[in-house]
Image (cartoon, grey):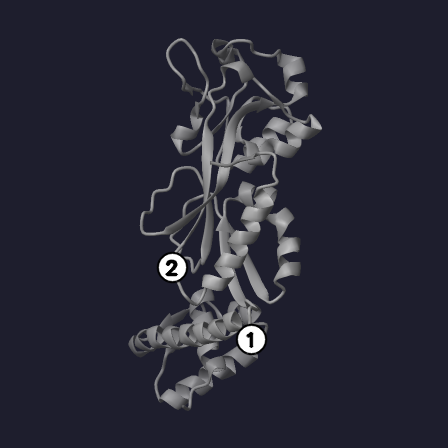
């Protein structure tokens, strides 16, 4: 075989990242090294794979056809390496994990150090997104999702449940008063989500039911932004326990209308496509995560 794996990796990395310089960063090489690898590959194949302009790189028809084959070869090599690692009980390779920014910051990041010590040869690549992503499109191996699952084509492993709470800072309540009835929320500054609208349905028991639709005074697209606003004393918010556990333990946030709050437990799942090449890495990560979350005060099993 004339083509080398380094050349195939350079080619696919350029496509995935959109530029030679970005591919060089991903591969830990120089831009000139990646460029030379592409040139060697095109010379060996006697064809042009990429059209280079001053603004972007574009696949030729031959390049598009070769790309799918290149990916299969790299995946086959990765699977072969993973199988050897599994035989030696020594998981290795890259694991791409996606989670919402709040879950990444408050749950995953504090646990990463312990995981890396236990599995030093697994390379973690962490991505944050507050929107549900397509795992294949974003080249993601594993996603952590809180809330109802929508994609039935994914394999899912439950990790626990997190209670929804209505919270505010003591400073805000000292200034504005503590509501004693759900109806009194109309006189308060309420911090809500721009989307989805369902997040502005708070689990509060009142004469008309057990779900209270709020009209936010302040809107944000991110749960972490809403948490920071609540900590800053800007109003009352409704957030999952995993985000506010430490704040409530420290007294920076307190429960509001606790007696009127309906117990809503938000499920937390790990989702992934079944891939034998990734099985060991995913299993190691999920087993470690389950072990750690079992000791968290906010996690409710069952």
Classed neighbour count for the residue bearing mark 2: other residues with Cα under 10 Å, few (<14), some (14–19), many (≥20): some
Number of callouts in the render?
Answer: 2
CA gap, disc 1 and disc 2: 34 Å
SS label for mark 1: helix
Seen at 40% across and 8% down, the residue is 207
Q: Which of 183 and 142 is in front in this view?
A: 142
Q: Where is residue 45 in the image (x, y as percent from the top left)?
A: 36, 87
Seen at 43% across and 37% down, the residue is 147
Residue 257 visible within the image: no
Identify whether 161 is placed above or below 281: above
- Going from N to C along the chain, the mark reached first, 1 or 2, is 1
Q: Nearer the viewer, residue 15 or 152?
A: 152
Give the foreground label among 1 and 2.
2
Seen at 55% across and 17% down, the residue is 258
Seen at 51% across and 30% down, the residue is 163
Location of mark 2 (residue) = 274
Q: Nearer the viewer, residue 234 or 73?
A: 73
Quadrant of res 71: bottom left
Q: In this view, does 47 lie to the left or right of 194?
A: left
Q: Where is residue 211 in the image (x, y as percent from the top left)?
A: 40, 19
Location of mark 1 (residue) = 31
């Amino acid at each position: 075989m004339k083509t080398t794996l380094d050349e195939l990796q350079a080619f696919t990395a350029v496509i995935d990242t959109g530029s030679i310089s970005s591919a060089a960063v991903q591969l830990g090489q120089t831009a000139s090294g990646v460029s030379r690898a592409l040139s060697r590959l095109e010379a060996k194949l006697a064809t042009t794979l990429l059209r280079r302009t001053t603004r972007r790189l574009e696949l030729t028809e031959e390049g598009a056809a070769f790309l799918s084959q290149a990916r299969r070869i790299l995946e086959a090599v990765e699977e072969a390496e993973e199988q050897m690692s599994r035989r030696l009980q020594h998981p290795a390779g890259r694991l791409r994990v996606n989670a919402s920014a709040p879950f990444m910051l408050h749950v995953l990041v504090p646990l990463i150090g312990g995981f890396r010590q236990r599995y030093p040869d697994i390379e973690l690549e962490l991505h944050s997104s507050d929107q549900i992503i397509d795992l294949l499109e974003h080249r993601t191996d594993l996603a952590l999702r809180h809330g109802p699952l929508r994609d039935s084509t994914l394999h899912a492993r439950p990790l626990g449940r997190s209670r929804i709470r209505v919270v505010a800072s003591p400073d805000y309540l000292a200034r504005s008063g503590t509501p004693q009835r759900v109806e009194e929320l109309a006189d308060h500054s309420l911090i809500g989500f721009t989307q989805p609208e369902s997040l502005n349905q708070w689990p509060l028991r009142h004469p008309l039911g057990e779900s209270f639709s709020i009209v936010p005074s302040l809107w944000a697209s991110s749960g972490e932004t809403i948490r920071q606003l609540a900590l800053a004393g800007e109003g009352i918010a409704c957030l999952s326990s995993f985000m506010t556990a430490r704040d409530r333990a420290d007294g920076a946030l307190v429960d509001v209308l606790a007696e009127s709050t309906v117990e809503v437990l938000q499920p937390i799942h790990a989702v992934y496509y079944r891939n034998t090449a990734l099985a060991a890495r995913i299993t190691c990560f999920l087993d470690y995560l389950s072990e750690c979350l079992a000791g968290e005060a906010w996690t409710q099993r069952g």
